[in-house]
Every structure is written in structure tokens, then in C-alpha cells.
Image: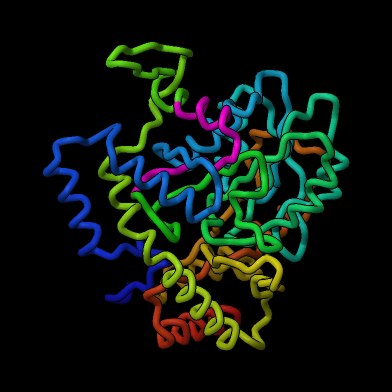
């Protein structure tokens, strides 16, 4: 293994700002249910243009609580895309409902609106599209395919993305975000739900904290909730990055442009980047035309380049019901390679990755 590994997507944290904020938390002696979480929620709500953000302990927790607070219950069906990280479908199970898996579109890897329309039954409560890899799905077509159904966003990869001028996070009744270390903004582990619905936000705040509210120093337990709180330290880490988020997004788009130049002519398809729904490039996913991804990934890792699969074909897991065949999802899982992309990647790094990928394809 080479001495230097070109990382897939390391945390993009401004260290001095993060140390200062975390130090302030430790000095305060207030580690949970404090001012940093409130400040992080308010700043993120302003960034997204929504009335409420509720911070929680993980992106998966955000998906789970979003569904429960929105009224998804046992006996309901929730339509999800067949090509995604498994937490999308698992969160539906955690809410007591049944995920129904449908195929994705060949060009974008986002949910296929026609497949959504075909999968709707009397039990369909909600549709939860994913903005795959940071590319917004065609929200208007999905909404038209599911009239009268609850629409919620799995926006785990889409902080900073926009569809038709609207921020991802504004499109559905609610949206779940992830702040895992591979995301553009990280709290180490953490997530959040964005919504304009006052009642939904109040329910989320109860659910994340044991169903408890405090009035006049008196605790009251309104419902059987969960412990999905985000700590003050994690919130401080997130706050340290919000001011510089636009610079991170711009740098990632620059790196994506370098890749487009360096990979031109190779037998693969680059990620789409439509003007009406620009990509955040949380993951730089290329799709090989005539090669198996596993062998190419192994070659890149031997060359000192971290690579992998950014999503799974849910039909291969044997855990969830599919509403018919999902050939596009299965094909993507076989041909998809996630290449390194982050704001600190240099032009020379991109050329190194491109050369190794060209060698692998040869």
C-alpha cells in the first residue's frame, strides 16, 4: 500500500474554529440540552429557509423520527428508491411501517416517478425520495405521481442543494439531513429534520427527548419518546462549519469540474449536473460502461486511492419488498464507483485518480 492514501471524503472541519467552540462548551459545563444546539438549529433553519430545524443524534434517527412524527404507523406502506443507503428503508421499518422498494432512473439514480405511481396502493401513506449523492430528485414529477400522499425528503446528502430555486429541505412536509463525517458539514455523528410545520416540529422535539417537556422546572412526559438528542459538543462542531459551507460547496464543484476534464474519453458515465437542480457532489459517483465495479475498486485501493460503493441495491439484501423488478438499481450497484471528492483535494490528486482509473479500465 502506498504511504499516502488519497481519501474518499475526509471531514472538512476548520480545526481552529471547532476547537474554540468545543472548548467553550467544555468550559461552560453544559454538555446537553443547552444553547449550542439551539444556536445550531436556528442557524441551519435560516440557511435552509424553513421555520424549524430539530437536531438529533444521527441521520438515521432523523429519518425515523420524521416518519413517526408525520404519522406513519404500523400497517402503512412507504415507497422508497431501490438504490440508496439501507438506512432509508430501515427507518421505515423502525417506524413500524413497510418499505416498498421501486426502481430508479437510469440517468440520475434518483427515484423513478413512473415506478412510484405504479406502486401506490390503498395502504400507501408516504413517499420518501432520496436526493442521491447530493443530486436533487425531480420533485415535481414525484409529487405528480403521488397525489394526496405524504412526501418527505431523505436529504442526507443534499445540504446546500436546490431544485428549481428551492432548497432541498423545503420541498416536502419535512426533510431529514445527515451530518456523518462524509457529509459536507459534520457533527461527527448527528442529523436534523427541517420543516415548516409547527405541530410537526413540536412533536419531533418531544420524541427526541423521551417525550418530555419541562414547564416551570416541572417535568412532564407527554408520550413514550426516544433518546435521540444531539449533544452540545456535536452542535458546536456543526456550528463551526456553517459559515464556511458555501466555500466548501464551491470547492467541491471545482473538483468535480477537474474530474469532468480528466475523465473525458474513458468508458464511463459522469454524474449529471443539471442547471435546474445543481449537484452538491457529496459523492462523486461514476458508472462504468463495460466493467464490474468491484475489480476497479480493488485496483484503485491497491494504488492508494480510497474508493467504494456509495449506495446499495436494496433488492439484493433480501430484507424489503420490491414493487416489481428493479433492474436499473441492480445495474447501478454492479457498475458504480465512488471516487475521492472533498474540498481539499488538489488538481494533481484528481489527475492521479484519473490515471489510476484509466489503468484499471485498461
The N terminus lies in quadrant: bottom left
Residue located farthest toward the front when viewing the structure as drawn: 216
Badge count:
0
Q: Is residue 109 left or right of residue 202?
A: right
Q: Residue 332 at x, y = what percent?
A: 68, 60
Would you say 4 lies left or right of 339 here? left
Choose between 354 and 70: the one closer to the eye: 70
Of 318 and 15, nearer the camera is 15
Quarter where residue 231 is shown: top left
Give the image location of residue 13, x and y in percent. 31, 62
Question: Residue 115 lies in magenta, yes or no?
Answer: no
Q: Is residue 336 above or below residue 27?
A: below
Place residue 208 in its image quadrant: top left
Residue at screen point 62% across, 37% down: 89
**Residue 237 appears in the rendering:** yes
Quadrant of residue 269 in the image? bottom right
Identify which residue is drawn at 43% across, 23% down: 226
Q: Extreme left residue here?
A: 27
Looking at the image, residue 7 sits to the left or right of residue 4; the answer is right
Residue 252, relative to residue 147: is it above or below?
A: below
Residue at 77% from the left image edge and 62% from the top image edge: 106
State the image coordinates of residue 227 (x, y, percent, origin top left).
Answer: 38, 25
Residue 299 in view: no
Tell me the magenta residue range: 188-205
In this view, the residue in front, 301 or 310, is: 310
* Colour logic: rainbow
Q: Is residue 34 above or below residue 175?
A: above
Q: Residue at x 78, y 49 (%)?
A: 142
Residue 321, image x and y in percent? Answer: 73, 33
Q: Is residue 201 magenta?
A: yes
Amino acid at each position: 500500500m502506498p504511504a499516502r492514501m488519497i481519501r474518499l471524503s475526509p471531514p472538512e472541519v476548520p480545526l481552529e474554529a471547532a476547537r474554540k467552540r468545543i472548548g467553550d462548551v467544555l468550559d461552560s459545563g453544559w454538555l446537553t440540552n443547552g444553547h449550542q444546539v439551539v444556536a445550531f438549529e436556528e442557524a441551519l433553519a435560516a440557511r435552509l429557509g424553513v421555520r424549524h430545524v430539530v437536531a438529533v443524534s444521527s441521520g438515521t434517527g432523523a429519518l425515523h423520527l420524521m416518519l413517526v412524527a408525520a404519522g406513519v404507523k404500523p400497517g402503512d406502506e412507504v415507497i422508497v428508491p431501490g438504490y440508496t443507503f439501507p438506512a432509508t428503508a430501515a427507518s421505515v421499518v423502525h417506524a413500524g411501517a413497510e418499505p416498498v422498494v421501486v426502481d430508479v432512473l437510469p440517468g440520475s439514480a434518483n427515484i423513478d416517478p413512473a415506478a412510484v405511481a405504479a406502486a401506490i396502493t390503498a395502504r400507501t401513506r408516504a413517499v420518501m425520495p432520496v436526493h442521491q449523492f447530493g443530486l436533487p430528485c425531480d420533485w415535481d414529477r414525484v409529487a405528480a405521481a403521488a397525489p394526496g400522499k405524504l412526501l418527505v425528503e431523505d436529504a442526507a446528502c443534499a445540504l446546500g442543494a436546490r431544485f428549481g430555486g428551492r432548497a432541498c429541505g423545503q420541498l416536502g412536509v419535512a426533510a431529514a439531513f445527515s451530518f456523518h463525517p462524509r457529509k459536507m458539514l459534520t457533527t461527527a455523528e448527528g442529523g436534523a429534520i427541517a420543516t415548516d410545520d409547527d405541530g410537526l416540529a413540536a412533536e419531533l422535539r418531544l420524541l427526541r427527548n423521551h417525550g418530555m417537556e419541562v414547564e416551570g422546572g416541572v417535568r412532564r412526559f407527554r408520550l413514550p419518546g426516544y433518546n435521540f438528542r444531539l449533544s452540545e459538543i456535536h452542535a458546536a462542531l456543526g456550528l463551526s462549519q456553517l459559515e464556511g459551507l458555501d466555500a466548501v460547496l464551491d470547492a467541491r464543484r471545482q473538483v468535480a469540474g477537474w474530474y469532468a476534464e480528466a475523465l473525458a474519453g474513458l468508458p464511463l458515465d459522469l454524474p449529471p449536473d443539471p442547471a435546474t437542480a445543481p449537484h452538491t457532489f457529496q459523492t462523486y459517483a461514476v458508472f462504468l460502461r463495460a466493467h464490474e465495479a468491484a475489480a476497479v475498486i480493488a485496483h484503485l485501493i491497491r494504488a492508494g486511492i480510497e474508493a467504494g460503493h456509495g449506495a446499495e441495491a436494496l433488492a439484493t439484501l433480501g430484507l424489503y419488498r420490491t414493487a416489481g423488478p428493479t433492474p436499473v438499481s441492480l445495474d447501478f450497484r454492479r457498475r458504480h464507483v465512488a471516487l475521492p471528492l472533498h474540498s481539499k483535494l488538489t488538481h494533481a490528486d484528481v489527475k492521479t485518480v484519473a490515471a489510476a482509473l484509466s489503468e484499471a479500465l485498461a
